[in-house]
């Protein structure tokens, strides 16, 4: 008997989709800023100006959104918790190995998980770190226009660790890492959805998953 | 040929006496003072104060040391199309030691340096051009049988202040570029306890040295600096933010190839690897050679020579982004990125196929 349970609360789903929207916007505008492939036909246009503006606004939304999600990892239900990113209890480690053997096609049955899987948690933690570095390097580069301003006071220390050009390279390369994540993330979701048939894909829209009765406790 | 009288008049008194003796009008002198106030980022009212200070100033003594350098900063200092007031202000510094331009040679020359250190201890300004090699006890740069670090310790250690001119003296520059065979470093790194003002650039802009001297004469001290010891009046803002081509950047008009239509129209050199967005300096404002031009005005992107270690950090000069460590110089970050993305996509597809095959096998086993 399968039971329909509420896994992803509204803030989890909303922040997920805002992240998607911001990352797509940031990547598209970022690619243009790094390599402006559209050339203005007259000097009255403001293409780079607007693209940068959109990039900066999306960056602010992304960071605030991230902050809300981090808040919810303390305030939300047991599936939203930050603890999911650190699956280091004995039980979670066993699940982690079972999960890896499933992905490596050694076993054919995935461990049934309701919230984040252990491997997913580790990956999300790394993505969180990457997003953090991206935000810090991004705001540091943004602050260069006014080295006496508050932004530079907050983020100028980055340039004592790496030259400006190196910081720009790091910021650029993180975009590619996030693209790899998106490729693998979408694949894994579709794959698991087709194997587990537990409503994983639809759960990020409506929040519900279908779980066998004995698993729900 | 100058007559005796003139020489006597010149050597007596401070800078202002000499400026007048050189036939500079009061009006031109005040114009120069206003310009210096502008370079220093001061209001126009400071022009009078600067004029007063220069009028009263005693001849400051200056020694100029050259270590691992190309004398490019000396060239910047000496470049003379016409005798400008700036040049005279620099001239009136009593330059008691400068290997390239001084008359004495050999032991005599070294003696003038010794004399300055002995007789004017704590009162003279030391300018250092070129990097200091530390490897193998500093044997890679010796003057008069003494290593650069030895000379620097003594001369800079006893100076009122040290001005490191050029990127070599401030961060090691080209001699310190990877693999840095001589272990070259900048003056501030070699002598952490000495007061050092960094005037980066390859070469530094002599206007900034003049302004530093004027600041010194006016306020009796060195100007405020940024986190790497560069005066804020010259290095406080980004080249990109004062560039005359900035409007083309914001509009989205970029040079795509040398000599293309955009290049002829004076569009932004961003895509040609201009390092203006990564570089702090006042090049677009004060320009070079008495405000004649500067690299971007001449149609070539900035190479970021005002930034520390520009030879390693700003290359390739004609690319937007530095090369990715571990990959060849021809491979850009985006090629690597797209390559790995393709591998990820292929990997994902392969996994799905493998899983489908495995799944079938499994079903067979189950039914058997």
Image (spheres, coloured by chain):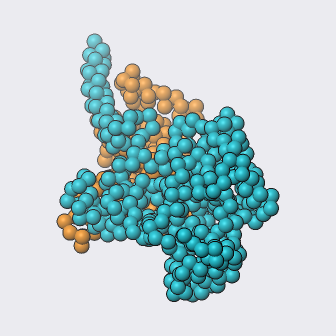
Chain colours: A orange, B cyan
Identified at 47% across, 59% down, the residue is B279
Reply above or below: A29 against B131: below
Identified at 21% across, 56% down, the residue is B260
Reply above or below: B298 against A132: below
Q: Quadrant of the N terminus of chain A?
A: top left
Reply above or below: B342 against B84: above
**Horizontal and vertical percent for residue B47?**
57, 84
**Nearer the observer, B187 or B347:** B187
Reply above or below: B342 against A41: above
Task: Please identify the quarter of the rendering in which residue B266 is found.
Answer: bottom left
Q: Residue furthest top?
A: B368
**Horizontal and vertical percent for residue B297?**
35, 64
- Residue A157 seen: no
- Residue B272 seen: yes
**Nearer the observer, B32 or B112:** B112
Identified at 61% across, 65% down, the residue is B225
**Nearer the observer, B107 or B291:** B107
**Horizontal and vertical percent for residue B329?**
38, 38
Q: In this rendering, would B148 be left or right of A115?
A: right
Identified at 34% across, 61% down, the residue is B298
């Amino acid at each position: 008997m399968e039971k329909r349970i509420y896994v992803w609360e509204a803030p989890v789903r909303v922040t997920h989709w805002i992240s998607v929207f911001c990352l797509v916007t940031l990547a598209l505008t970022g690619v243009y800023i790094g390599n402006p492939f559209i050339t203005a036909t007259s000097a009255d246009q403001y293409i780079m100006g607007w693209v940068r503006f959109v990039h900066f606004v999306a960056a602010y939304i992304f960071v605030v959104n991230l902050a809300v999600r981090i808040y919810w990892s303390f305030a939300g239900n047991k599936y939203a918790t930050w603890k999911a990113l650190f699956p280091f209890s004995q039980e979670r480690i066993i699940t982690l190995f079972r999960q890896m053997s499933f992905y490596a096609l050694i076993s054919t049955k995935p461990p049934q998980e309701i919230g984040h899987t252990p491997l997913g948690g580790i990956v999300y933690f790394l993505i969180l770190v990457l997003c953090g570095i991206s935000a810090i390097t991004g705001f540091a580069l943004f602050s260069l226009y006014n080295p006496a301003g508050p932004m530079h006071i907050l983020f100028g220390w980055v340039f004592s660790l790496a030259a400006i050009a190196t910081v720009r390279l790091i910021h650029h390369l993180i975009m590619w890492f996030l693209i790899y994540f998106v490729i693998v993330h979408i694949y894994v979701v579709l794959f698991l959805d087709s194997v587990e048939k537990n409503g994983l894909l639809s759960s990020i829209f409506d929040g519900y998953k279908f779980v066998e009765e004995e698993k729900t406790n | 040929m100058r007559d005796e009288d003139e020489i006597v008049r010149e050597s007596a008194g401070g800078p202002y006496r000499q400026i007048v003796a050189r036939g500079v009008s009061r009006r031109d002198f005040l114009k120069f003072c206003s310009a210096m106030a502008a370079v220093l980022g001061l209001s126009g009212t400071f022009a009078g104060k600067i004029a007063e200070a220069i009028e009263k100033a005693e001849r400051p003594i200056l020694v100029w040391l050259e270590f691992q350098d190309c004398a490019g900063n000396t060239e910047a200092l000496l470049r003379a199309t016409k005798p400008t007031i700036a040049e005279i202000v620099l001239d009136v510094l009593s330059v008691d030691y400068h290997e390239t331009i001084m008359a004495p040679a050999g032991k005599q020359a070294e003696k003038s340096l010794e004399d300055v250190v002995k007789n004017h201890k704590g009162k003279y300004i030391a300018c250092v051009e070129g990097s200091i090699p530390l490897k193998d006890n500093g044997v890679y740069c010796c003057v008069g049988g003494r290593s650069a670090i030895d000379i620097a310790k003594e001369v800079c250690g006893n100076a009122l202040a040290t001005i490191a001119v050029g990127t070599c003296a401030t961060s090691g520059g080209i001699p310190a570029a990877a693999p840095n065979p001589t272990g070259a470093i900048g003056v501030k790194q070699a002598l952490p306890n000495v007061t050092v003002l960094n005037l980066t650039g390859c070469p530094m802009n002599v206007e900034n040295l003049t302004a530093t001297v004027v600041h010194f004469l006016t306020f009796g001290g060195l100007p405020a600096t940024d986190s790497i010891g560069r005066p804020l009046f010259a290095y406080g803002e980004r080249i990109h933010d004062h560039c005359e081509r900035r409007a083309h950047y914001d509009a989205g008009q970029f040079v795509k190839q040398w000599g293309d239509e955009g290049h002829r129209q004076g569009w932004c050199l961003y895509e040609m690897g201009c390092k203006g967005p990564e570089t702090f300096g006042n090049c677009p404002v004060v320009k070079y050679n008495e405000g004649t031009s500067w690299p971007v005005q001449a149609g070539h992107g900035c190479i970021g020579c005002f930034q520390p270690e520009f030879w390693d950090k700003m290359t390739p000069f004609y690319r937007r982004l530095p090369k990715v460590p571990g990959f060849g110089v021809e491979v850009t970050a985006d090629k690597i990125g797209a390559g790995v993305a393709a591998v990820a996509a292929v990997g994902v597809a392969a996994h799905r196929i493998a899983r489908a095959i495995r799944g079938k096998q499994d079903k067979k086993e189950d039914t058997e």
